[in-house]
Image (spheres, helix red, strand yellow):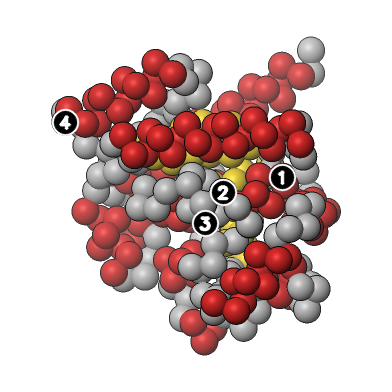
Amino acid sequence: MGKIIAVAIPKGGVGKTTTAVNLAIAFALSGKRTLLIDVDPAGSCAEILGYKKEEITSDIFNVLQFNSSFQQVLLKSPAANLNFIPMKHLTYIDEIRLGRLSTNEKLLSNILKPEAYSYDYVVIDCPPYLIGTTNAALIAADTVLIPTMPGQLSINAVNKIVNHVKDIQKKYNSRLRIEGILLTIYEYNTRVSFATKKNLFRKYPNLIFNTTIPKNATVGEASVNNKPVLIFDPAAKASLAYINLAQEIIQKRDLINLENQF
């Protein structure tokens, strides 16, 4: 079955959606059958992938309401090996409905698990808060990837989701693990970046990815052109970092699978 990775942190502006989209593309470029699912009511994944609003006729919300099947909402992406399930930009009323659906904690998990067998990796982009669809994604996931930018507020958000993961493990999903903490929008040789990395390593020495995603103007240029940075400029520093991140996750999984054989 495909490994389900939720990309989540209760803070906006840290590159969460950018990470989810480009990590999924990096997996696909590595030859892995990959599915990207957007469960954030902002619906930003579709925009990054170049879809116009009128092109999104059904989404994961329709699936959760049992108005559409999983297969009916699948879309192709700019990368081979990558399928995509969008979330339309929801109205206030639809967000309330989605919140009510999310009180059925196992709903997303029950729908997703049978479909995950068709993929090597499933990446879920979560909203920047812990309730609702983020909670549902963590209950469905095997691991959670926590992106965070330099700064104390981001460190506080990391602490919050790490504690939340412990609650999810106790109540709903004992197999859930932290895939890693990913430093994003990282500026080398700055005090705030160094201090953030130092503090995170001190508290979570075994959870920090070797890969960091550098601050890179090309990411913004790609966004303006409605393209993921990995598609817009594969040679950009951020693009190469996302390729390295995917390889780090793949190699870790391969090593665990090898160890489990003995």
Quadrant, the C terminus: top right
Which-is-in-front pick, marks 1 and 4? Answer: 1
- Amino acid type, label 2: Leu
Whole-number angstrom distance, CA of label 2 to CA of label 4: 30 Å
Element at badge 3? loop
- Amino acid type, label 4: Thr
Which-is-in-front pick, marks 2 and 4? Answer: 2
Badge 1 density bin: few <14, some 14–19, many ≥20, Cα 10 Å:
many
- The numbered mark, 1 or 4, whose residue comes first in the sequence reads 1
Find disc 3 in the rendering and name its residue. 127
Q: Are marks 2 and 1 in contact (CB under 8 Å)?
A: no
The percent position of residue 253, horizontal first and vertical second, equals 63, 29
Find disc 1 in the rendering and name its residue. 139
Whole-number angstrom distance, CA of label 4 to CA of label 3: 29 Å
The percent position of residue 86, horizontal first and vertical second, equals 58, 69
Identified at 71% across, 25% down, the residue is: 257
The percent position of residue 256, horizontal first and vertical second, equals 67, 22
Element at badge 2? loop
Q: Which mark is residue 130?
A: 2
- The numbered mark, 1 or 3, whose residue comes first in the sequence reads 3
Left or right: 111, with 242 as reference point: right
Element at badge 4? loop
Identified at 31% across, 20% down, the residue is: 198
Q: Quadrant of residue 17?
A: bottom left
Find disc 4 in the rendering and name its residue. 190
